[in-house]
Amino acid sequence: MLLFAGWPSSPDTGRVGGSEGPTHNSLAAGGPGAEAFGVPSDGRFLLRPWSLDDVDWAVAACQDDEISRWTRVPSPYGRDEAVEFIEHATATRADGSELHWVVEEPGHPEPRVGAIGLIGIGDHEAEGGYWVAAEARDRGVARAALAILVDHAFGDLGLSRVWLEILQGNTGSERAAVAAGFTPVETRPAQGCGQPGDLVTVFERRLDAPR
């Protein structure tokens, strides 16, 4: 399972799809790996790699119909799917083709509040996607996590463009993307999420774009 595709309609999900390809950035052979940059954080939220300790939490969070409605997260979603995804996330982190994180808000009884990642990393760009657990919505998680993601992508990973594909109708995710500095640039048919005939809006952030 990929962690991407138009995630819930609160401000708390924006979709990913995207192709995989060779890396041409600071994760490429000879450059520093993702672990060299520590844990991206804004002082309130942080992004840390997935581990198998997250299986039960992921399974519980992904029972939410809003996640499967707006993203590529499959339904039904059980332990096998969670383990497969986490193993995939670990392998692609090692080769630099994808980076997936759990979003945490330390200090809460359940600090894990969502998931975010980059896929198709190559040619100084990548596609991003995220979802926020139902109980953590309306706390600014999506906007903050997107801002941390972009700062890390541009400042540490050597990327110059990050884009999202958000299913039309997912107005909350569109608002979160705009609040995090993303701009809508085009509309295209949805792939891997939604229903036949659905469209996604592509939002992007560029390193050289004015804020």
Image (tube, rainbow, N blue to C red):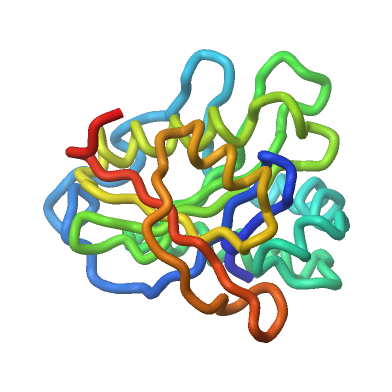
Residue 32 occupies which quadrant of the picture? top left
Most foreground residue, 10 or 123: 10
Question: Taking 132 as reference, is 4 left or right?
Answer: left
Residue 78 occupies which quadrant of the picture? bottom right
Report the quarter where the N terminus lies: bottom right
Report the quarter where the C terminus lies: top left
Residue 139 occupies which quadrant of the picture? top right
Residue at image location 60% in from the left, 41% down from the top: 102
Residue at image location 53% in from the left, 78% down from the top: 189
Question: Taking 198 as reference, is 183 left or right?
Answer: left
Residue at image location 26% in from the left, 38% down from the top: 154
Above/below status of 173 relative to 163: above
Residue 183 at what x, y percent from top left?
39, 46
Question: Taking 79 as reference, is 34 left or right?
Answer: left
Most foreground residue, 109 or 64: 64
Residue 76 at what x, y percent from top left?
86, 72
Q: How many marks?
A: 0
Residue 187 at what x, y percent from top left?
46, 68
Residue 53 at what x, y percent from top left?
71, 45
Residue at image location 34% in from the left, 35% down from the top: 152
